[in-house]
């Protein structure tokens, strides 16, 4: 089975993404992405898969996965009861880190960590214990403190001992091969054409399927209906524009592919629990408070 492509969506004004998710969750499936990932398990135990390795996981374990390495963590919970938080996740691009190493040779110690991540890493309990508070703080950190804590976290990982490499030395990810699968072609097409008027019928034709078959196919691979997935991508793009620019809300609406402002406001409120204008004010206020601090 080909892994599916996760669209990480690091925002333009950030160099990495920190978030949490529960279980079940849409990314809990065999998947890959071009970014490095740190995954700290906070609740539940179960079985995990990284590249050609499989093992069991439990709370408190910290993993690192390199670019395009397929991975998945499957929790064992009674009757599939939902878990509010299963893990904390940090994702960052290799390009930004390599740029930092080039600018600051003192960061060269990170290169070994990045190479090892190509096989997947399970860190020792001692390392996980040191790293866990920083991953918690990074969920709320802003500005310079955010970067400082991120580098402190990487230092802990780069100097860690007793880590375990997971996939075999001969394992090689094949992102081109993964991308050739129909679902990944569809997801990539969606991401590249968000500002256009897209319908499920359009994507069905793109995938060479009947509309009803495509609807079942899309939901089977993403766990959500097409329009819900599309709206989520568009709202995420809108958030990035609202935070990083002064583009009027109406222009943001159309730039993200919505055909009318009322629907945009309705979808934004449903996903972010506040209207777009208030969302922008909230982030500007946080930035002002950070500057004063």
Image (cartoon, helix red, strand yellow):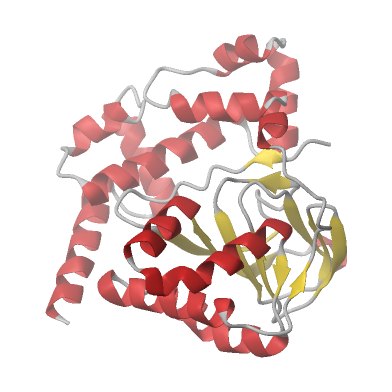
Q: Residue furthest front?
A: 105
Residue at image location 63% in from the left, 56% down from the top: 66
Image point (33%, 22%), residue name: 259
Of the 4 image quadrants, the one containing the N terminus is top right
Q: Nearer the viewer, residue 190 or 266?
A: 190
Q: Quadrant of residue 151?
A: bottom left
Q: Nearer the viewer, residue 144 or 186?
A: 144
In the rendered structure, the answer to whether residue 252 lies left or right of residue 68 reads: left
Q: Quadrant of residue 163?
A: bottom right
Vertical relation: 110 (above or below) 280: below
List x then y, in percent, for residue 96.
Answer: 40, 55
Please tell me in which quadrant of the rendered image residue 161 appears.
bottom right
The C terminus: image quadrant: bottom left
- Residue 280 at what x, y percent from top left? 22, 53
Q: Is residue 126 left or right of residue 169?
A: left
Q: Residue at x 72, y 10 (%)?
A: 210
In the shown orientation, is residue 64 left or right of residue 237? right
Above-or-below relation of 91 to 221? below
Q: In the depicted view, which residue is nearer to us: 55 or 97?
A: 97
Res 223 seen here: no
Give me the residue at 39% from left, 75% from top: 106
Percent position of residue 281, x then y: 19, 57
Q: How many marks?
A: 0
Q: Is residue 279 above or below residue 184?
A: below
Res 147 seen here: yes
């Amino acid at each position: 089975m080909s892994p599916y492509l996760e669209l990480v969506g690091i925002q333009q004004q950030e160099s990495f993404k920190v978030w949490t998710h529960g279980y079940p969750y849409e990314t809990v499936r065999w998947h890959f992405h071009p970014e490095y990932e740190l995954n700290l398990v906070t609740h539940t135990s179960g079985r995990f898969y990284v590249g050609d390795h499989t093992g069991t996981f439990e709370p408190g374990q910290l993993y690192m996965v390199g670019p395009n390495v397929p991975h998945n963590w499957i929790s064992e919970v009674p009757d599939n009861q939902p878990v509010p938080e299963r893990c904390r996740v940090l994702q960052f691009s290799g390009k930004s880190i390599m740029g930092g190493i080039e600018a600051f040779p003192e960061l060269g110690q990170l290169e070994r960590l990045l190479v090892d991540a190509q096989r997947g890493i399970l860190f020792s309990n001692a390392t996980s214990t040191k790293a866990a508070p920083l991953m918690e703080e990074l969920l709320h950190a802003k500005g310079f403190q955010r970067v400082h804590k991120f580098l402190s976290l990487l230092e802990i990982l780069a100097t860690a001992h007793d880590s375990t490499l997971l996939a075999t030395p001969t394992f090689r990810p094949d992102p081109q091969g993964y991308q050739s699968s129909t679902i990944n072609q569809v997801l990539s097409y969606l991401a590249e054409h968000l500002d256009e008027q897209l319908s499920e019928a359009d994507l069905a034709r793109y995938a060479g399927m009947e509309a009803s078959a495509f609807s079942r196919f899309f939901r089977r691979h993403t766990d959500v209906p097409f329009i819900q997935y599309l709206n989520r991508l568009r709202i995420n793009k809108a958030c990035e524009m609202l935070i990083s620019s002064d583009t009027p809300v109406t222009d943001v609406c159309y730039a993200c592919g919505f055909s009318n402002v009322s629907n945009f406001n309705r979808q934004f409120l449903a996903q972010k629990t506040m209207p777009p204008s208030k969302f922008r004010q909230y982030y500007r206020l946080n930035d002002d408070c950070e500057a004063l601090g």
